[in-house]
Amino acid sequence: ATLVGQFSIGGMTCAACVNSVEGILRALPGVKRAVVALATSLGEVEYDPSVISKDDIVNAIEDAGFDGSLVQ
Ligand code: 9UX
């Protein structure tokens, strides 16, 4: 099964930040798709909840130096 989560990603200021966060998210085990938007500071992540949790995804965003939180 897969779920889609929306995450707020604060602190992104340029397109390279977006690419960096997308790369980090896409490299996480259990993440199938990740799309990040600079204008809205939002990321949509499709993931397998039996492999990775929402909190794991938030923590990965935080570990990359951004301000991550779950939107829904
Ligand atoms: Mo852009 Mo982001 O120069 O951490 S890569 S600010």
Image: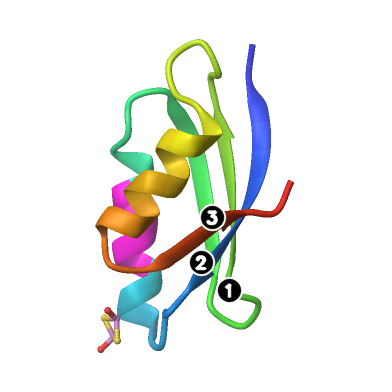
Relative side of 69 to 63, left or right = right
Give the crowd class for mark 3: few <14, some 14-19, many >=20 residues within 10 Å.
Answer: some
Relative to 49, residue 44 above or below = below
Residue ID at (34%, 75%): 17
Residue 28 drawn above or below residue 34: above
Three-letter amino acid code of the residue under disc 1? Ser
Q: Which colour style is shown?
A: rainbow
Asked which secondary structure carries label 1, the reply is loop
Is 23 in the magenta? yes
| Residue 20 placement, left or right of 14 | left
Q: Which residue in the protein does label 2 denote?
A: 9
Examine the image and state in which quarter residue 52 appears: top left
Report if the beta carbon of the residue with label 2 is closer than 8 angstroms to ligand 1.
no
Q: Residues within 10 Å of mark 2 (few under 14, many from 20)?
A: many
- Dividing the image into four quarters, tell me where ligand 1 lies: bottom left
Identify residue for label 3: 35
Q: As drawn, is 19 to the left or to the right of 7?
A: left
Which is nearer the N-term, disc 3 or disc 1?
3
> Which kind of residue does numbered mark 2 sit on?
Ile
Query: Image point 50% across, 47% down: which residue?
Result: 34
Residue occupying the point 48% across, 30% down: 32
Image position of 14 with respect to 58: above or below: below
Separation (CA) of disc 3 from disc 1: 11 Å
The magenta stretch is 19-24
Q: Are marks 3 and 2 in contact (CB under 8 Å)?
A: no
Q: Which residue is mark 1?
A: 41
Q: CA distance from mark 3 to mark 2?
A: 12 Å
